[in-house]
Image (tube, rainbow, N blue to C red):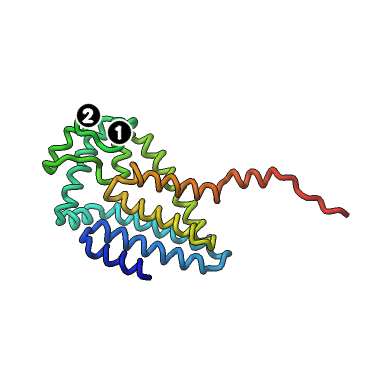
């Protein structure tokens, strides 16, 4: 309880909209998972599909009203700065849409085309401030599809395990992925260093405990024959 209070105070005192937003998303995800863990096993699958449908509906509404959302958010100076970077990146993405400009991880200002982006905001940039835009920019559509599939599969497995298994370890894995994905909307740290390390650890943990290969092994096992 003490650590939770300290965490909440730290988030409030940080004054960072990104930090506050990630904390709220994580709190909502934790409450949903706790409710799913208490649900009856036979109804849990249905709740998963309902949550998936609601999530897709929210994404669709956000896409259809993106103009209004951008108009509201553009009143904040920090978001305007991000929007300028994304617009410039999209112009460069259209030049190499399939293969991208090449993977570099952290941006290198001395290498093309990264040095051309330093004119935005009159400061040096080390990322796109959005992991998915960054992946699209550096690896193109091919890399973006692979990365999105990898992240989606890891999160789906971790979420299902967190709802079905009682151990706190599974809940931790799912919530860490929630934090990583929510932060990826405003930062690119999931692609490098400890962000990438956490993503790999969580995906390996989820894959080990919920793998299609395990079902294949069970299907290959000889069935016991009852003596008559």
Residue 2 placed where, x, y %?
35, 70
Residue at 20 percent across and 47 percent down: it is 82
The quarter of the displayed image where residue 174 is located: bottom left
The quarter of the displayed image where residue 212 is located: top right
* Location of the C terminus (image quadrant): bottom right
Q: Residue furthest left?
A: 122
Tell me the element at label 2.
loop
Q: Are marks 2 and 1 in contact (CB under 8 Å)?
A: yes
Q: CA distance from mark 2 to mark 1?
A: 10 Å
* Location of the N terminus (image quadrant): bottom left
Residue at 36 percent across and 46 percent down: it is 194
Question: Compared to 213, does 160 lie above or below?
Answer: below
Residue at 34 percent across and 30 percent down: it is 99
Residue closer to the observer: 215 or 90:
215
Residue 104's mark?
Answer: 1
- Count the labels in the image: 2
Give the mark nearest the N terminus, 2 or 1.
1
Residue 22 placed where, x, y %?
31, 58
Residue 165 placed where, x, y %?
54, 60
Residue closer to the observer: 34 or 39:
34
- Residue of label 2: 111
């Amino acid at each position: 309880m003490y650590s939770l209070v300290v965490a909440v105070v730290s988030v409030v005192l940080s004054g960072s909209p990104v930090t506050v937003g990630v904390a709220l998303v994580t709190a909502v995800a934790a409450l949903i998972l706790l409710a799913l863990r208490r649900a009856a096993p036979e109804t849990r699958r249905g709740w998963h599909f309902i949550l998936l449908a609601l999530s897709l509906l929210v994404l669709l509404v956000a896409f259809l009203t993106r103009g209004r959302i951008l108009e509201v958010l553009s009143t904040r100076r920090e978001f305007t700065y991000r929007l300028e970077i994304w617009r410039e990146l999209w112009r460069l993405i259209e030049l190499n849409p399939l293969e991208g400009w090449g993977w570099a991880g952290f941006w290198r200002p001395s290498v093309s085309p990264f040095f051309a982006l330093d004119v935005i905001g009159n400061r040096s940039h080390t990322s796109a401030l959005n992991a998915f835009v960054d992946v699209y920019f550096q690896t193109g559509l091919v890399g973006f599809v692979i990365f999105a599939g990898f992240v989606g599969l890891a999160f789906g497995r971790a979420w299902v395990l967190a709802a079905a298994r009682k151990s706190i370890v599974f809940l931790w894995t799912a919530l860490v992925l929630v934090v990583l994905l929510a932060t990826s909307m405003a930062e690119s740290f999931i692609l490098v260093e400890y962000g990438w390390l956490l993503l790999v650890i969580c995906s390996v943990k989820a894959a080990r405990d919920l793998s299609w290969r395990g079902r294949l092994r069970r299907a290959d096992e000889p069935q016991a024959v009852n003596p008559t």
